């Protein structure tokens, strides 16, 4: 069956190229049927990519080791779930996943918009086709999942680090994010190509961007959680280039999400918005490039393949072409309104944009510095976590504060008196929190204290917004508090959904500050019966046990945990030795205290032959807020995404009135 | 192997049909022009956006005033100009709307 | 506040200047990163570097008691030189002869004395990170 897979991918490539050429010609020369035909080509490309993907999945499940890819990433004793996830466990399969999601998104975008935004879609199709053609080219000619061999008896198995639920979900979610950013990008470029200066492209892609951004955010959080639990060094983010590869497009997309609100409300920042979506999309391509080229020293690098130059070339094409297009359409994008005051919500959004871009570019500099330095001086130089943490604080803390300030400032112009009135409660809460925490000893970390104080400010301002809104709603239409609250949120989904997301970010910031600025660590070698003290806890080493799992031998050191004399049960930490893959993995023990929100984190670093174990233990305060923040984030996103019938009708009317979709 | 070839050929055939569909359905199309918004439509869009923005700003100002974010004084200063903006935008759209409506009616088949 | 020109441009210009100033301040105080070199390039260098090499021979000692000693050679076989590394701290599970590693430290009296906990092992072929960092 590999021939079918190969053939299907060639068909995808052909269809994508057709979509580019025919689509561009049709859009330029206003040919209705040809444009329609190009759209069909994109939809059909999704179909043929599904078939190719199906061939790969079947080969994996059937343990068909004549497929080089199956032999390299699965083995006979691998549980089925992980066998399926091996689809994206390697270079070729992950590129195919990219292509699958891309063609899927393209097909949906075309189907949803082909009637209502006909002239816009005509130009969007060639852009989507171009990106699809690139990835199809890679999987057909440079990294095919369908290379065959004489089948060995058993496969090499999936890397043990990937054998857990987080690593199953992490790549698909990230890809839903990365690829998702292609759609708003394509619409932005399509609008420019069609010489449109209105916000149709934003309206059409608002939900896409939100979904992609949420997926990218959750995907990263899952990755961090995996790093925390499975890799187990006590942290969750190491500023490794591959981690940054996902963070950068997310930051750019966050700036974009906020900035488009300004265009919608005031008709400003049109050029910013196109540039931001270009930045987000290019960074997601760049991120994919980073993880595959081996050009940057990273422990996460997929492989030292030769796809680097291709990606780099495509990124240059995308960035160069887009910038040239923006330049030529600059007169069209002139703003209709001006920024009236430096103290207005528009202005805070502008500061927001600037800070996000600054942070993103700082990270980008940190990631590319080694190669740039090598190109100039012949030697690589690495910028470590110190660099990143400094700038995260320099730009991140003001952003945190801005999250609280923004909603309190009025549009157009805010008088200082109304500002002072709005700021009173949140500022008061922040100062009170700061003083209290200082008294409790939080002064040991200034950035931590600042983060906590700012967080108090933001949380109070969000709470204030909700209570003020609910009270006003209730004054208007009576009813219970609960009814008023749900009405308020239902009528202003984007605003209050946004507040929930901001609350999630604050929880995240508190969790990060707590677990990194205020954690405790202790280590030592223990023989049976000896105790290690860390923070309030005392850990006594009890026993070492060995069990045989389905594909690994499991060694666990058991430890008794007490705190202030009370027994808190046992904790286990140790190692797994995987037979097929010939690897050892670290298995940490985590005890989450949900009341305090802290984690007791235990690593059995070294298991000596004489039964002694070298332990390393952390107390990580408030770290569980980080994972909770993920759930709140998801909730807020859902609220914001929820369709608003009234809004849909108004927009449909606006575009129908203009006579664009006169014929159906 | 032959099964794979047959399926591959079938796939290619289906795709060719999909791509050719617009031409198969409408071989002698009377009109093959892709519509694009003309001057009138673009102006309509622009005015529509301005109107929606003005109306939304008014609605948000009301909300902000009711929830206490905007003081009475600020509200009085801001509401006048906003209302004027909105009514100007609505007025600007009226003659355009009438024109567009007649065009749409003329366009409608049979 | 009536302004002829939009204050936005001023804000952007000032912000860019501010960001650059912060950036330059940081780099002038902290410096421009740690050099990443191969064992063959280590000769004569006494500053703190990131050494990237291929593990050869058999490691001796205990990283948690007196230090682990192992030898590194160039990853891409540029030179024949070998460097002995003395390391204390967490040892990643993937660490063994035949793997590529990165470790920070300084050359002292012919031995590369590593900064505790800075040993990172690269995964052999597929994507799987393995980090063991004492500093979060």
Image: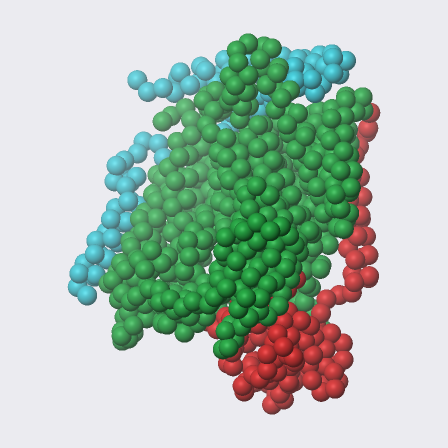
Chain colours: A green, B cyan, C red
Q: Position of residue C123 (x, y in %)?
A: 50, 70
Side of C61 relative to A584 (left or right): right
Count numbered badges in the picture.
0
Query: Can you say which quadrant of the picture contains the N terminus of chain A?
Result: bottom left
Which one is in front, B52 or A58? A58
Q: Position of residue C46 (x, y in %)?
A: 76, 80
Query: Can you say which quadrant of the picture contains the C terminus of chain A?
Result: top left
Classify residue A151 by image quadrant: bottom left
Side of C48 relative to A26 (left or right): right
Q: Position of residue A183 (x, y in %)?
A: 48, 43
Q: Position of residue B54 (x, y in %)?
A: 62, 19
Relative to A577, residue C111 above or below: below
Q: Say whether residue A242 is visible.
A: no
Classify residue C27 by image quadrant: bottom right
Give the residue at x 53% y 64%: A541
* Residue at the farthest bottom position: C80
Give the residue at x 33% y 55%: A81
Side of A190 relative to A442 (left or right): left
* Residue at the farthest left position: B2
Q: Say whether residue A494 is visible.
A: yes
Which one is in front, C87 or A161? C87
Which one is in front, A482 or A91? A482
Relative to A231, residue C41 above or below: below
Give the residue at x 74% y 83%: C108
Give the residue at x 71% y 43%: A451
């Amino acid at each position: 069956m590999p021939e079918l897979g190969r053939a299907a991918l060639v068909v995808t490539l052909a269809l994508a190229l057709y979509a580019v050429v025919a689509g561009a010609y049709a859009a330029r020369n206003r040919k209705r049927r040809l444009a329609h035909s190009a759209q069909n080509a994109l939809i059909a490309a999704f179909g043929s990519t599904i078939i190719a993907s199906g061939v790969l999945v079947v080969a994996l499940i059937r343990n068909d080791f004549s497929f080089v890819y199956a032999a390299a990433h699965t083995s006979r004793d691998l549980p089925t779930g992980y066998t399926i996830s091996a689809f994206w466990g390697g270079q070729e399969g992950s590129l195919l996943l990219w292509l699958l999601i891309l063609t899927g998104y393209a097909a949906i975008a075309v189907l949803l918009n082909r009637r209502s935004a006909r002239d816009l879609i005509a130009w969007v199709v060639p852009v989507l086709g171009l990106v699809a053609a690139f990835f199809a080219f890679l999987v057909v000619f440079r990294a095919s999942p369908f290379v065959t061999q004489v089948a060995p008896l058993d496969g090499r198995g999936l890397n043990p680090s990937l054998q857990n639920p987080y690593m199953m979900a992490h790549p698909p979610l990230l890809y839903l994010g990365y690829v998702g950013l292609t759609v708003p990008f394509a619409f932005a470029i399509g609008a420019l190509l069609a010489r449109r200066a209105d916000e149709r492209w934003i309206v059409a892609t608002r939900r896409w961007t939100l979904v992609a951004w949420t997926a990218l955010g959750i995907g990263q959080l899952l990755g961090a959680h995996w790093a925390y639990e499975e890799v187990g060094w006590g942290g969750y983010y190491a500023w490794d280039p591959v981690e940054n590869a996902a963070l950068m497009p997310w930051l750019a997309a966050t700036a974009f999400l906020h900035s488009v609100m300004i265009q919608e409300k005031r008709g400003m920042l049109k050029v910013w918005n196109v540039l931001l979506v270009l930045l987000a999309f290019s960074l997601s391509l760049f991120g994919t490039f980073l993880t595959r080229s081996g050009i940057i020293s990273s422990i996460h690098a997929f492989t030292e393949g030769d796809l680097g130059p291709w990606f780099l070339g495509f990124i240059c094409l995308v960035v160069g072409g887009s910038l040239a297009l923006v330049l030529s359409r600059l007169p069209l994008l002139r703003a209709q309104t001006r920024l009236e005051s430096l103290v207005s919500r528009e202005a805070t959004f502008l500061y927001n944009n600037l800070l996000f871009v600054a942070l993103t570019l700082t990270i980008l500099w940190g990631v590319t510095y080694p190669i740039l330095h090598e190109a100039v001086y012949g030697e690589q130089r690495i910028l470590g976590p110190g660099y990143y943490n400094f700038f995260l604080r320099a730009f991140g803390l003001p952003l945190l504060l801005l999250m609280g300030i923004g909603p309190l400032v009025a549009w157009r112009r805010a008088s200082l008196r109304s500002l002072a009135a709005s700021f009173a409660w949140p500022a008061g809460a922040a100062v009170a929190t700061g003083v209290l925490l200082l008294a409790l000893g939080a002064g040991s970390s200034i950035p931590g204290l600042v983060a906590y104080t700012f967080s108090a400010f933001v949380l109070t301002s969000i709470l204030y917004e909700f209570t003020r809104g609910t009270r006003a709603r209730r004054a208007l239409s009576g009813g219970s508090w609960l009814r008023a609250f749900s009405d308020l949120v239902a009528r202003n989904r984007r605003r209050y959904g946004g507040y929930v997301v901001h609350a999630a970010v604050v929880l995240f910031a508190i969790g990060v500050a707590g677990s990194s600025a205020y954690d405790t660590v202790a280590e030592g070698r223990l023989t049976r019966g000896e105790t290690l003290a860390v923070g309030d806890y005392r850990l006594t080493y009890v026993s070492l046990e060995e069990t045989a799992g389905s594909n690994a031998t499991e060694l666990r050191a058991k430890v008794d945990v007490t705190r202030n004399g009370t027994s808190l049960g046992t904790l286990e930490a140790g190692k797994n030795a995987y037979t097929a893959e010939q690897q050892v993995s670290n298995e940490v023990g985590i005890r989450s205290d949900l009341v305090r929100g802290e984690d007791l984190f235990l690593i059995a670093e070294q298991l000596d032959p004489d039964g002694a174990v070298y332990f390393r233990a952390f107390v990580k305060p408030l770290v569980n807020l980080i994972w909770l923040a993920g759930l709140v984030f998801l909730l807020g996103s859902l609220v914001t995404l929820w369709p608003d019938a009234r809004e849909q009708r108004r927009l449909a009317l606006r575009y129908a009135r203009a006579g664009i979709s006169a014929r159906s | 192997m032959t099964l794979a070839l047959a399926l591959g050929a079938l796939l290619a055939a289906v795709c060719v049909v999909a791509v050719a569909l617009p031409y198969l359905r409408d071989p002698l199309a009377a009109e093959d022009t892709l519509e694009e918004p003309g001057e009138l439509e673009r102006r309509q869009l622009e005015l529509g956006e301005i109107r929606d923005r003005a109306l939304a700003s008014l609605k948000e100002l009301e909300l902000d005033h009711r929830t206490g974010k905007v003081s009475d004084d600020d509200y009085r200063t801001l509401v006048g100009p906003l209302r004027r903006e909105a009514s100007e935008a609505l007025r600007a759209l009226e003659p355009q709307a009438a024109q567009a409506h007649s065009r749409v009616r003329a366009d409608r088949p049979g | 506040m009536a302004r002829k020109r939009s204050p936005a441009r001023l804000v952007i210009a000032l912000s860019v200047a501010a960001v650059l100033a912060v950036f330059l301040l940081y780099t002038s105080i902290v410096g421009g990163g740690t050099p990443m070199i191969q064992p063959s390039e280590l000769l004569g260098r006494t500053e703190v570097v990131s050494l990237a090499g291929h593990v050869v021979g058999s490691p001796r000692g205990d990283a948690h008691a007196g230090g682990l000693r192992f030898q590194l050679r160039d990853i891409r076989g540029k030179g024949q030189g070998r460097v002995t590394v003395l390391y204390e701290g967490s040892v990643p599970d993937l660490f063994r002869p035949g793997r590529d590693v990165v470790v920070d430290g300084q050359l002292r009296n012919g031995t590369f004395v590593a900064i505790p906990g800075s040993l990172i092992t690269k995964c052999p072929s597929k994507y799987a990170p393995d980090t063991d960092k004492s500093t979060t």
